[in-house]
Image: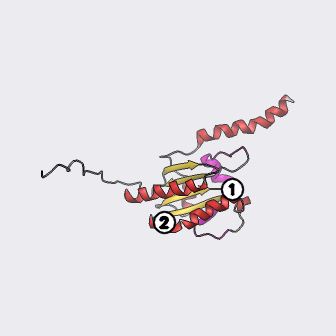
Amino acid sequence: MKYLAALILLPSLANALVPLLSLTVGDSFPAKALSNWGLKGKNSVVYFFGADDAPSCKKQSALFDESFADFQKAGAKVVGVRNDAGDKGAVVSQTLVIDEDDEIRNEIGIPKDFFVLGGRETYVLNKKGEVELVFNNQFNVDKHVELSLEKVEELKGAGGGGGFALPDFSELFAGAGK
């Protein structure tokens, strides 16, 4: 019985350690994914979700679709990533890709939620492929879109991210000429 309990708990322990290995702000996103998904040199949003037919996944995809023009206006490409089990042929404006055998998901360390659900995690990347934002929340799908849009608009305003933006010197000259 002890061995059975150990076998059951071992995967849970392994999953508990995964967040320690996850990508964080400033890390580089896997080059293979950037290249394969057409993201090199572009500000991008990459969101990982489970299946097209799960209600929260449908909602998340639909919300990104509804905001697609806003993301385009901000100069960002949006890519939704699901595993091969999630491929149900959804028709959307943004790019949807299949992560064969969860290769990229595992490489970047996205933890499973509740030990069984593929983690719902969103990344905003600058033009250099560096992570600017990470958001992980299985239930608040609206927030994935909201925070991503805010960040890509911020990147656009700062010259696109991954580059040099001039500091705001207005306060230095506020009293000049008085």
Residue bearing the label numbered 1: 50
Q: Is residue 163 toward the left or the right of residue 38 in the image?
A: left
Residue 101 image position (x, y, % from top left): 70, 54
Residue 79 image position (x, y, % from top left): 57, 62
Q: Name the front one of labels 2 and 1.
A: 2
Q: Residue at x 71, y 63 (%)?
A: 87
Q: Residue at x 71, y 44 (%)?
A: 114
105 part of magenta stretch: yes
- Helix, strand or loop at mark 2: helix
Residue 65 image position (x, y, % from top left): 58, 66
Marked residue nearer the N-terminal end (2 or 1)? 1
The extreme top residue here reads 2
- Distance of label 2 from label 1 (alpha carbons): 24 Å
Q: Residue at x 50, y 50 (%)?
A: 133
119 part of magenta stretch: no
Q: Amino acid at mark 2?
A: Asp
- Residue 99 visible within the image: no
Locate the N terminus and report the quarter of the image it occupies.
top right
Is 113 rendered above or below residue 48?
Answer: above
Region rendered in magenta:
90-115
Would you say the residues marked 2 and 1 are in contact, meaning their CB atoms lie under 8 Å apart? no
Residue bearing the label numbered 2: 70
The extreme front residue here reads 178
The extreme left residue here reads 178
- Helix, strand or loop at mark 1: loop
Viewer-nearest residue: 130 or 118: 118
